[in-house]
Amino acid sequence: MADENKQQGPSPAQSAENSAAATPSVPPKPAAAAKSGAPVPLPWQSEMVDSFKGRFGSGISEAVSYLGQNYLVVDRSALSEVLLAARAQESFDYLVDLTAVHYPQRELPFDVVYVLYSFARNERIRVKAQIADGEAVQSVVQIWSTANWLERECYDMFGIVFQGHPDLKRILLPDGWQGHPLRKDYGIIQQDQQWVKANLGIESGQ
Amino acid sequence: MTDPTTTVSHLDLGAKNETFLDANELILNMGPQHPSTHGVLRVILKLDGEKVLGTECVIGYLHRGVEKIAENRTYTMFNPYVDRMDYVAAVSNGLGYCEAVEKLLNVEAPPRARYVRTILTELNRIASHQLWLGTHALDIGAITPLFYTFRDREEILKIFEKYCGARLTTHAFRIGGCQYETYDGFERDVKNFVSFVTPKVDEYEELLTTNRIWLERTRGVGLLSGPDCIDLGVTGPVLRASGVKWDLRKAQPYAAYSEFDFEIPTGQNGDTYDRYVVRIAEMRQSLRIISQAVERIPEGPIMAKVGKVLKPPPGEIYHSIEAPKGELGYFIVSDGSTQPYRLRVRPPSFVNLQALDKMVRGQLVADVVAVIGTLDIVLGEVDR
């Protein structure tokens, strides 16, 4: 029974692997129309993007819309000003999430990602910036208090330093731990052997 | 800890016109093994007598590296892991993850699957709120609600068990829909549950809503204003109790939520009592959604056509749902392979816990217990 699901009603048209199936002819219709074909990133055009581009010029590298979600790629030099403008002028008053992605083969190996939401506009955007290893990013705790723990977690997991953070220290891992586990060069079963020996009194935590 | 040599002698007190406790700041360690921390949370309290001057949370005792694990598993293999974050609302976790990957694949779950998902997720919301109510009341000193809520929660777990074989870590959904067709009598069981539990919610209210001890312990305790909630990123019932009428099921509907009538309960004062009232009202709204959904589950397949090997095209997605505790988001970066390049979980418990310090400053030690309870955190999700 594991792989066999009861197929009831009209069977959906044979479709490619990645296209949406099932549009049966029953009253409750899907909320959104099923799309076909592979999604492509499109340029994101809006008043806000225009005003940012006018103000920061080449500080805004890209404005992209992918799968209905919009994001800005900004230069690291303009990052904190763009975020402040998003909060102050564009009413993005809720910092949903702050995280990073590690691309070790890139010249600037880290993407710092900010997910912002505006209650007034009911709109969610992302702001991304590429930074070098060891380069400090301006903390946004002054703009959104949420950033306090989120930046600490980002520091803990990636070793990204947030300048101006009131208390930047590890949050999920123990204070004396060496290494930042979400970096790509950190193995999945890797651990800080010295810390484990000294603090747990065992040879290995594995 | 206080140094005994600097402790003020009792003999000096008269001269300084201070009590013994006024003269000392006391650092008190609460947890990590403490029943009212609902898991392994350590809170370091700085006290002046009974008054809290400040707190610091020490977390990470349950850190398992869920995000690292995700990078080393295929999309399908990672699915059961998400159940183990917020283990009292495993179905919600699964819904958020499956929908995020579906978006990345540009696949949509069939209507039947979306209805079944909505029903199970709302049942899970009730179960989560029931567990919260029982334990929160127990922390404050009322034992009876625990028995009531656990008795009724059992009925939900029975439905889960009949549907997918598991009670807590259900792994109920698959990427593309639901693996299992509903069992014979599913609709009947759900309808029976709704008529069974509706009067029970009134029973909980009878025990607590006008109970004088409950009012004394919760009214005006752990105040958090709407703007503070937004600044701190606090979501879910805590945000709504502070008067912000915002629910992702309405703001950015997912699953089948756009097709049902329900309201967003809100409070005005943003205190522990309002959060209780909001969650009780949410249980009733969930019952409303379930009874509408179960009446008109569409026919059709329950699983979309997705390949056995999932390879989302390169790109990234952020998808979030209204979990019982707040906004649960998944940020997934795909590099076109079978494994996520990066998977980030935006856990509501982690972000909401950050508000603890603001909520208990200037309050009494006993209120810390009430506030940790009212935040409704699950440490498995805080630490991941």
Image (cartoon, coloured by chain):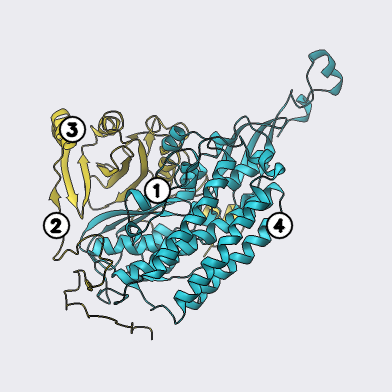
Chain colours: A yellow, B cyan
Q: For the point 29% across and 32% down, which residue is it?
A: A80
Decide: is A141 above or below A194: above
Q: Which residue is mark 1?
A: B247
Q: Is residue B41 left or right of residue B339?
A: right
**What is the chain identity of the residue bearing mark 2?**
A
Q: Marks 1/4: CA distance?
A: 31 Å
Q: Marks 2/3: CA distance?
A: 24 Å
Residue B368 in view, yes or no: yes
Q: Which residue is mark 2?
A: A40
**What is the chain identity of the residue bearing mark 3?**
A
Going from the N terminus, do you reach mark 2 or mark 3 first? 2
Q: Position of residue B113 (x, y in %)?
A: 34, 70
Which label lies toward us, 2 or 1?
Answer: 1
Q: Which amino acid type corresponds to the residue marked 1 in the rendered image?
A: Asp
Q: Which amino acid type corresponds to the residue marked 2 in the rendered image?
A: Val
Discs 1, 4: same chain: yes
Q: Is mark 1 in CB contact (under 8 Å) with mark 3?
A: no
Q: Is B126 or B222 nearer to us in this picture?
A: B126
Dot 4 lies on which element? helix
Q: Which residue is mark 3?
A: A52
Q: Is mark 4 in CB contact (under 8 Å) with mark 3?
A: no
